[in-house]
Image (cartoon, rainbow, N blue to C red):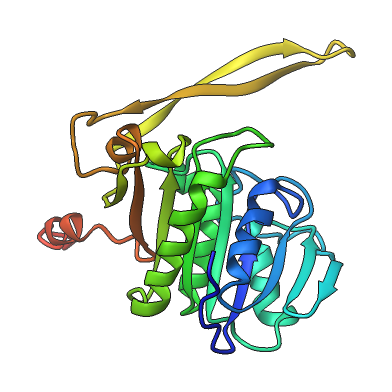
Amino acid sequence: MADTVKENRLILVTNDDGVEAKGIKFLTEIAQHFGDVVVIAPDKGKSGMSHSVSLNEPIYIDKVSEKPGLEIYACSGTPADSVKIALHKILKRKPDLILSGINHGSNASVSAIYSGTVAAAREGSMNGITSIAFSLLSHEPDADFTAAAKYVQVIIEKVVQNGIAKQTCLNVNIPNVPENEIKGIRICRQTLGKWIEEFDYRVNPHNKDYYWLTGKFSNFEPSAEDTDEWALNNNYVAIVPIEVDLTSYTALKDIQKWDFNL
């Protein structure tokens, strides 16, 4: 992997699987080809935290390691906390780029709503920082990220060269197949679908009832070829641009016609 011109670039790397996850270590290695890197990530797995922040408990930061061009910190808070405290307390200046991931597991379709990895990138875009979330479709702690390397680097290079629209981040999902089976990159929209939840009833050793959340994803449009789920199911890397603005402009026009005169 050839070094890219670093141009005094400062890069913040984070995730939701925790600072010791294999995916973030892999992403950190790639990020160092683009500039100086500061890693600030949860001290343990915080998957499914979405954009939650710590309002009722303190946030602790511990320096894990430091060497020229690379600092690593563990944060007791959420992925969004990690970005916020990085911007306000840890970094000496505003970073040029925020990279989140590489997540262990898909963040395609509505999973992007629940994802702490995607939320960290979204927090970056809210602060005017070019941000990308990366995910590999494998939940295995020892997942093989070799095939993802080429695509992660290419996407970062393109973003560095071209930038991203304001208040927008990229949600990148990579199929878990050998590199020679990945067909390329597709720019997609988010698939319409939902998780069909199931709650597995159990009893703990103290005879206390509890439930364990499980479920499966239901794709509402499996034949739509412009979606991230279709791309991934057909061995393409899927890139979905995500905006901070949650306004439904279609509904806005309809509701503006309503008569609210009381």
Position in image of residue 90 (x %, y %): 75, 79
Q: Is residue 67 above or below residue 132?
A: below
Residue at x 79% of width, y 54% of height: 43
- Quadrant of the frame with the N terminus: bottom right
Write the residue at 60% across / 58% down.
Answer: 27
Question: In the image, what residue occupies the spot 54% across and 88% down?
Answer: 7
Query: Could you tell me if residue 80 is visible in this image?
Result: no
Q: Please, which residue is most extreme toward the right here?
A: 206
In x, y percent, where is residue 164? 35, 73
In-front residue for pair 244/7: 7
- Residue 230 appears left or right of 135: left
Q: Position of residue 175 (x, y in %)?
A: 43, 39
In front of the other: 27 or 54 = 27
Residue depicted at x 58% and y 54%: 101
Tell me, yes or no, if residue 12 can be seen here: yes
Q: Which image quadrant is residue 94 in?
A: bottom right
Q: Position of residue 18 (x, y in %)?
A: 72, 50
Q: Is residue 186 left or right of residue 12?
A: left
89 or 146, which is in the foreground? 146
The answer to whether 4 is drawn above or below residue 25 in the figure is: below
Q: Seen in the image, is 45 located left or right of residue 261?
A: right
Give the quarter of the figure containing the C terminus.
bottom left
